[in-house]
Amino acid sequence: MMECAIIKDLLPSFIDGLTSEESNRVVGEHLKECAKCRDYLEEMKAELESGKYMEINKEQEKAEIWIFKKLKKIMERTVFGTIVAVLLVMVVLWGIYEQTFIFRISTLSDEVEVTYENVKGVVRVGFEPKKDNVRIEGWMGVLYDESSGKLLTNASGRERDCLTLVSCGISPLKKDGNKKFYLHYVFLDDGTVIYLSEYGENIRAEEDDILTVEFGDKTVEIPLRDLRTEAGIEKLK
Ligand SMILES: [Zn+2]
């Protein structure tokens, strides 16, 4: 029985193949004769096998988790990709819309009909598009000297107004709306002129003040005085 105890101690190493040839021989001989130790060996082997099985299971679980994570990542990427793609399509569509309907280009002088109305010194000069589906916009600004960057002024000391005329396509979503651009001036008897600024202020100017009108193909400098008569606006045509 003493031998059995020694064999039992040796068995774990024996199973792992760590025992010497001499020990193997002793263990082998003992096992042939001792059923108890044979059973014990079988038990140990079975336990070991189940342990390995557990490990294999863990590996598989890990692999499954990895695959799941990978799948989740791919899904997230796909959702992200779809959102990016949808946004890109929207940007492109907006670009096409903008190009077609909102894009502004300088108005060529022969694309616009200049109209004139004068009711007792209240003058309205209109810029009407000759083409359909085009709107004329006027941008009022001030003139700068290009080399010095200084504001250009009239004889009266007032800044020089500059009107830039631009054409825009009309969006099918906004069929109504004004297609024409108007300038309004009120000529007073004392040689002053009142007009509405783009911010809605009443500006008092003088008849000698010069308005610069920029078309795509020409720039016209016209004293406000000339806007008082129909003959005077010939320069704008
Ligand atoms: Zn034994």
Image (cartoon, rainbow, N blue to C red):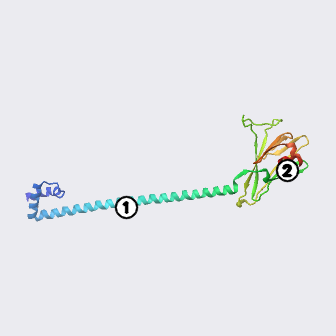
Q: Is residue 108 left or right of residue 54?
A: right
Q: Which residue position is annotated with label 1?
A: 64
Q: Is residue 183 above or below residue 57?
A: above
Residue 237 locus on image (x, y percent):
83, 49
Amino acid type, label 1: Glu
Residue 140's quadrant in the figure? top right
Residue 222 locus on image (x, y percent):
83, 43
Q: Which residue position is annotated with label 2?
A: 124
Residue 157's quadrant in the figure? top right
Query: For the point 12% across and 64% down, which residue is it?
Result: 36
Q: Is residue 197 left or right of residue 91?
A: right
21 and 11: which is toward the camera: 21
Question: For the view shown, which residue lies furthest in the top direction?
Answer: 148
Amino acid type, label 2: Arg
**Number of numbered discs present?**
2
Q: Residues within 10 Å of mark 1 (few under 14, many from 20)?
A: few
Query: For the point 41% across and 60% down, which residue is it?
Result: 68
Query: For the point 51% across and 59% down, which residue is it?
Result: 79
**In 3D space, how far apart are the residues under numbered discs 1 and 2 (Cα atoms)?**
79 Å
| Residue 117: numbered disc | none
Is disc 1 in contact with disc 2, using a CB cutoff of under 8 Å?
no
Query: For the point 14% across and 58% down, which residue is it?
Result: 8
**Mark closest to the chain's N terminus, 1 or 2:** 1
